[in-house]
Image (cartoon, rainbow, N blue to C red):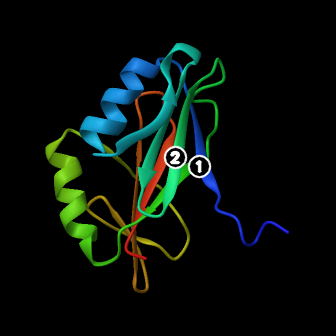
Amino acid sequence: MLADHDAQATVPVKDLTRARTFYEQVLGLKPVAGDAQNGVQGYQSGKSSIVVYQSAFAGTNQATTVTFSVGGKFDEVMRELKAKGVVFEHYDFPGVKLDGDVHVHGDSRVAWFKDPDGNIINLGNY
């Protein structure tokens, strides 16, 4: 039923103006459809999209909200995000080695960081 339809990440934020600065200037996402008066902004990300919307429940999720698969550009993207002031999270997972800000498990290299509202964002070399 839904397998032939695109899915999109939906991210709650407290302040849409502050979120737009982060998602556009720090992450480099391009705004597409949006309705700022009603607290909603859409972004294109590769072949998928992200909807950022104003919500009183922003930042309450303690799990990953959005995952970006950057493949071989992982190190480059990590450097660019660090240069823009992104602080990476460090987690302790069984069987996973922490190499600086990168969690390594076999060939997988991943990192996590938060948006201004505390939403957890994942970056991976997949």
Up-down: is 60 above or below 97?
Answer: above
Question: Residue 11, image x and y in percent?
Answer: 57, 38
Q: CA separation, marks 2 and 1?
A: 5 Å
> Of 117 and 43, which appears nearest the observer?
43
Residue under circle 2?
Answer: 50
- Is 19 positioned to the left or the right of 41 in the image? left
* Residue plotted at (31% across, 28% down): 21
Question: Residue 44, image x and y in percent?
Answer: 43, 50
* Quadrant showing the C terminus: bottom left
Disc 2: CA contacts within 10 A as few (<14), some (14-19) or many (>=20): many
Circle 2: element type: strand
* Residue plotted at (37% across, 21% down): 18
- Is 54 positioned to the left or the right of 33 in the image? right
Sequence-wise first label, 2 or 1: 1
Q: Quadrant of residue 76?
A: bottom left
- Name the kind of residue labelled 2 in the image: Ile
* Residue plotted at (35% across, 76% down): 71
> Of 66 and 4, which appears nearest the observer?
4
Circle 1: element type: strand
- Name the kind of residue labelled 1 in the image: Ala
* Quadrant showing the N terminus: bottom right
* Residue plotted at (56% across, 71% down): 94
Residue under circle 1?
Answer: 9
- Work out which residue is located at the far left of the displayed protein and give it: 83
